[in-house]
Image (cartoon, helix red, strand yellow):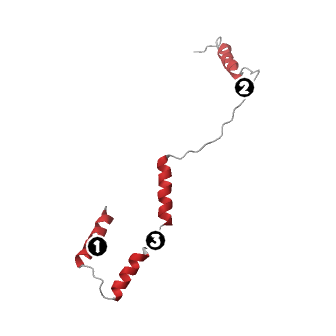
Amino acid sequence: MKIWGQIPQILGVYDKSKTAPKVDKSSAVVSKKDAVSISNQGKDFQAALKAAKEAPDVRTDKVEEIKQKMQKDTYEVSGNDIADKVLNSIRSRKL
């Protein structure tokens, strides 16, 4: 079935939507500056991270104490303590 009578009217709808109305005056554009704010929790984290970075990796007082005990043959570690540390290390890796 062919409908020839309505096609020009249908195409006219598309022609009307192609044109947009012109704007006489444009409003002033207000630009805003970007701002960054850090939460209190973030500031606390920064302070903790800074303190951790400034702390020495090696506790020299403990190292010296153990060195002196080893030189004097007074440094003793129980086998149970060693076994506990080994087992705890193995258990933590499996999780």
Quarter containing the N terminus: top right
Q: For the residues marked 3 and 1, what is the alpha-carbon distance in whole angstroms?
A: 22 Å
Q: In what element is the residue under mark 3?
A: loop
Identify the disc placed on residue 25.
none
For the residues carrying marks 3 and 2, which lies nearer the camera in this image? Answer: 3
Q: Mark 3 touching mark 2, by CB under 8 A?
A: no
Label 2: which secondary element: loop
- Residue at the disc numbered 2: 27
The answer to whether 29 is drawn above or below residue 77 in the figure is above
Depth check, mark 3 against mark 1: the one in front is 3
Question: In the picture, which quadrant includes the C terminus?
Answer: bottom left
| Three-letter code, disc 1 | Val
Q: Give me the residue at 40% from left, 80% from top.
A: 64
Q: Dot 2: within a 10 Å radius of its alpha carbon, few (fewer than 14), some, or many (20 or more) residues?
A: few
Q: Name the kind of residue labelled 3 in the image.
A: Asp
Q: Position of residue 8 (x, y in %)?
A: 68, 14
Q: Is residue 28 above or below residue 72?
A: above
The residue under label 2 is which amino acid type? Answer: Ser
Q: Quadrant of residue 28?
A: top right
Q: Nearer the viewer, residue 14 or 55?
A: 55
Task: Identify which residue, 5 or 86, lies in the foreground.
Answer: 86
- Give the x, y percent position of residue 24: 77, 20
Q: Which residue is mark 3?
A: 57
